Amino acid sequence: MSEFVSEGVGGIIAAAGSRAGRPLLQVGEISLVRRAVICYQQAGVFPIVVIVGGDKAVKKHLAPLGVIFLESGENDELIDAAKIGLKYLHNKCGRVVFTPVSAPMFAPSTLFALMRSKADIAAPSYRNKGGHPVLIADRLIPEILAYQGEDGLRGAVQACGSGRSWLEVEDPGILASAGDDEALNMNLKRHNRSLLRPVVSLSLEGEASFFSQRTKLLLYLLKDTENMRQSCKLSGIAHSMAWNMINRLEKNLGYKVVERQHGGSWGGRTSLTANGENLLSAFREFELYLNKTAQEYFNKNFICTHIMPS
């Protein structure tokens, strides 16, 4: 695989294993796992990796959101799921944020606070009680992957040379667990309020749409894996649909986005052209700019007048 280093923040959501709980449990009008994904996306986290088990329902549920799926055993511990995600994201982003799907009620503002921290390992606390998510610097990932102790992810974090920095936040949701329905419901109104944001869904269109969030993810994975079948497996996109997306993209742009080399058990090599890499980079930069601009305008000119009028 080619090296794909970014100074951004990638995300991991453990939705499989012995402590995964019920990822599709609906709290309010959306599932636990969708809440976690939305929080990550609102904070600009990309890519987002969801660790799933053998149940295809989670993949089907999240596929339209443009996340990456990696598989874990149903009896794996939390640290096993964390290691799967960390191994994949190592060298792909500067830092990684991790949460089990059983703890999805943290606010996006808590994520922003963690991301502003300069610590190599940062976690939120509320009234001196620690919670999720946990942010880990990429340079510490090899140490966590090498941990063989019996104290799980907590032990792996403690074994790292850099100590964990606790950030006190006004967010009781960091303590809410899927095993406590009362806590989930108590935090529901507050969490829904924290999710309130302008949603800017960027796509490129001519006579019809030819570049969407799923196209972005597909190009990202092709840059990383240089393999169409593997990219489809990771993204939950059907192989035939993926090629239709690429063909439609190239037809509308008038230039090659990928290079195809046939052969091999995985169907040969499919890598991005220089134009394809530039397109992916420009799209991501444009997307970040639009989301930042929309959020700033929303905060300054809209929310106080129309959402929380005096």
Image (tube, rainbow, N blue to C red):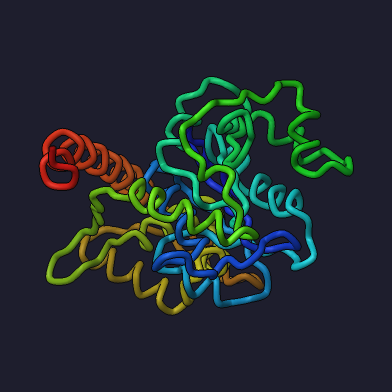
Residue found at the far bottom of this picture: 240
From the viewer's perspective, tell me whether residue 292 is left or right of residue 184: left
Q: Give me the residue at 42% from left, 71% from top.
A: 242
From the viewer's perspective, tell me whether residue 193 is left or right of residue 76: left
**Residue 208 found in image quarter:** bottom left
Where does residue 93 sit, x and y in percent of width and height? 53, 37
Q: Give me the residue at 17% from left, 63% from top.
A: 205
Q: Give me the residue at 30% from left, 61% from top.
A: 212
Q: Where 66 sits versus 299, above or below?
A: below
**Residue 157 found in image quarter:** top right
Q: Quadrant of the C terminus?
A: top left
* Residue 278 shows up from this direction: yes
From the viewer's perspective, tell me whether residue 273 is left or right of residue 255: right
Where does residue 206 sit, x and y in percent of width and height? 14, 65
Q: Nearer the viewer, residue 47 or 183?
A: 183
From the viewer's perspective, tell me whether residue 78 is left or right of residue 289: right
Q: Give me the residue at 58% from left, 35% from top.
A: 135
Q: Nearer the viewer, residue 281 or 153?
A: 153
Q: Nearer the viewer, residue 28 or 258?
A: 28
